[in-house]
């Protein structure tokens, strides 16, 4: 099982991250190991030795069958469920590595850095019009609609599958909107698709 993620897929987040808002020619792709996964309800323990740890709420889609070089128009056949997940990022470490021109995989792929909510079937959903949000102690800190993605879910799948065969159970984190920030120890995070709560856990 692979965890594939998209960086800077919302213009407002790209602007707050590095001041750019121009859509790139292709999606920015990175990966996390399966040891990054924390299932819904399990605590996230902040690894303080890595510096500032930021939360990034994202829609996550689950691949449901084997696929290679998938045309965008057929991509909808290859995923069956969606949820909200958190892409935790060691931000200090990431910026330091970027400035040094070095790979920043460890700042994204450490144990526990991918919290997953409960999946919901995509049947009946318009994947280009899904509201999702994240709260911290019941205060909304991130809120967006999938229509704001620079690259749609289907475009992402078509692009990734040119290089990597997608397999049943693979997960795709589709990018975070504006509002990401440090994960406050002792707080409770909840993720929603529309009004439905799909993610609920504590930061320790």
Image (cartoon, rainbow, N blue to C red):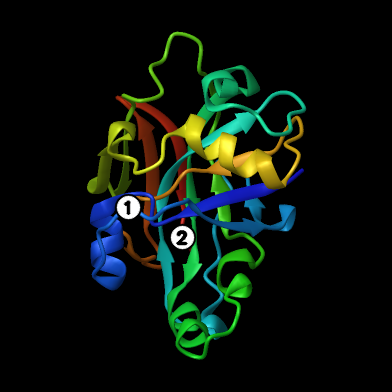
At horizontal 29% and vertical 58% (from top left) the residue drawn is: 13
Question: 98 or 121, which lies in front?
Answer: 98
The numbered mark, 2 or 1, whose residue comes first in the sequence reads 1
* Left or right, 166 with reference to 51: right
Residue placed furthest toward the front: 25
In the image, residue 178 sits, relative to residue 140, either above or below, namely below
Question: 74 or 113, which lies in front?
Answer: 74
* Left or right, 43 with reference to 130: right
Instruction: Report the Cα–Cα distance between label 2 and label 1.
Output: 33 Å
Quadrant of the image occupied by residue 95: bottom left
At horizontal 23% and vertical 70% (from top left) the residue drawn is: 19
* Left or right, 30 with reference to 152: right
The residue labelled by disc 2 is: 203
Tag 1: Cα neighbours inside 10 Å, few (<14), some, or many (≥20)?
A: some
In the image, residue 191 sits, relative to residue 119, either above or below, namely below
> Residue 102 appears at what percent x and percent y?
58, 84
At horizontal 69% and vertical 24% (from top left) the residue drawn is: 64
């Amino acid at each position: 099982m692979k965890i594939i993620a998209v960086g800077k897929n919302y213009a407002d987040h790209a602007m707050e991250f590095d001041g750019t808002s121009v859509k790139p020619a292709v999606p920015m792709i990175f990966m996390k190991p399966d040891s990054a996964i924390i299932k819904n309800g399990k605590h996230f323990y902040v690894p303080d030795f890595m510096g500032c740890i930021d939360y990034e709420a994202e829609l996550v889609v689950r691949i449901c069958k084997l696929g290679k070089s998938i045309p965008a128009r057929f991509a909808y056949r290859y995923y069956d469920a969606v949820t909200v997940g958190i892409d935790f990022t060691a931000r200090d470490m990431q910026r330091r590595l970027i400035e040094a021109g070095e790979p920043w995989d460890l700042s994204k792929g450490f144990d526990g850095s991918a919290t997953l909510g409960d999946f919901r079937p995509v049947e009946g959903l318009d994947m280009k019009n899904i509201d999702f949000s994240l709260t911290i102690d019941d205060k909304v800190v991130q809120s967006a609609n999938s229509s704001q993605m620079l690259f749609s879910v289907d475009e992402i799948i078509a692009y990734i599958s040119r290089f990597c065969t997608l397999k049943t159970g693979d997960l795709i984190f589709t990018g975070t909107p504006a509002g990401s920030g440090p994960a406050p120890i002792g707080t409770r995070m909840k993720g929603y698709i529309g009004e439905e709560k799909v993610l609920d856990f504590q930061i320790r």
